[in-house]
Image (cartoon, rainbow, N blue to C red):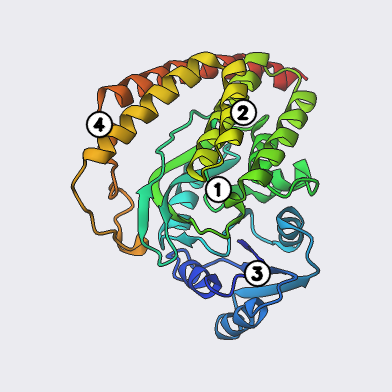
Amino acid sequence: MIVPAYNAQETLRETLNSALASTYRDLEIIVVDDGSTDRTFGIARDVAEQDRRVRIIRRENGGLSAALNSGFAVARGEYVARLDADDLWHPSKLEHQLEFARRHQDVAFIYTFARYIDGEGRVVRDGPNQPFPPRAFCRGIYESLVGGGSSALIKRSAVVEVGGCDEAFRNWEDLLLQLAVTRRLPIGCVPLFLVGYRIRPESLSKDIDQMVRGWRAVRSKLSSKYRLVPRFVLRWAHGVRCGMFAEGFAWRRRYLASAALLFEAAAHDPVWVYRFVRFRLSRRARKSTALVTVIAPCFLDCDPAEEVMVDPSTNGLAHFRFAEFEERRARTLAEADRHLAKRFEVE
């Protein structure tokens, strides 16, 4: 497994300890210190001195994609996994994934569900449970195959074949890698909440301006590289991303940027925008009337098979109708993927 780390002194030890607690013991942990200026290297060295399974690579800062490629280049296992330096794994994560791999040897990569956690490792909310079908290229473009990079277990041979991460991209690198791998090979899912994905103000994903720029570059690359993909898939995907970014800007009270992105989303996918806005308004109204306070549990204390932080506002009619709408879209995308898989095989 590869742990890319840049100025991660606050969380790196906890992250590494969660990996070292794995019930699957035969693993190597490669910490890639990407030019950190804090105590990241010292913490990694301390952990490595206590457990011989930990190795460290130090390099000049080159970004996340380059750091991951440095780890891929020296990894020796049949499978590789990424664990971001502020995320957590449940001890049984690798064991469940490798058991799935033994039963489905044609699968290129295997992902799990994730929970969002705060700086103290407490659960903020459960992530979406997305059991994708084995062929999910179009659906992956539409809603991303894996919500966070720390979920996937990928065949190292598949990573080598596609050339690793595209170092031209400082974000969205996980989506591009996953799509490149699954262009010809099926995916698999362990439907358990086995990853704690940390949300912090300084996280890369919180830099929404950078995320928007990155998505525009990714969209351009997908459009030029995968010309067999139906145009409606990219149109829907762009509408969804712009809508999500618009909501992010609204939360930050950047209302002009939010309105511009919402207008762009509506230009590409007006049906989704209408349903999404109606759902969000209903959800906000239900939240404002909710009086229940829930004590957030620690991620590592949670049962991976159970939902623990269910949003009560998702029980309303608007949520049901929006979920039904997305299910219909999923069926349309699945049909597109069935046709696309045959075309990719002969390309």
Amino acid type assigned to the residue bearing label 2 in the image: Ala
Residue designated by label 1: 152
Going by the numbered disc 3, the residue's amino acid type is Val
Residue 229, x across and y down, in percent: 69, 19
The reply to whether callout 4 and callout 1 are in contact (CB within 8 Å) is no
Which residue, given by chain and number where applicable, does mark 4 sit on? 315
Q: Considering only order in the chain, which callout, 2 or 4, is on the residue closer to the N terminus?
A: 2
Residue at (44% x, 24% y) in the render = 276
Q: Is residue 146 visible?
A: no
261 vs 93, nearest the viewer: 261
Q: Nearer the viewer, mark 4 or mark 1?
A: 4
Q: Is residue 39 left or right of residue 330?
A: right
Q: Residue at x 67, y 29 (%)?
A: 184
Q: Which residue is mark 3?
A: 31
Inter-mark Cα distance, 3 to 2: 41 Å
Q: Which mark is residue 260?
A: 2
Q: Is residue 270 above or below residue 23?
A: above
Above/below status of 41 relative to 3: below
Q: How many marks?
A: 4
What residue is drawn where x is 56% and y is 66%?
27
SS type, badge 3: strand
Residues under labels 2 and 1: Cα distance? 34 Å
CA separation in Å, label 3 and label 1: 17 Å
Q: Amino acid at mark 4?
A: Asn
Q: Determine the secondary structure under disc 2.
A: helix
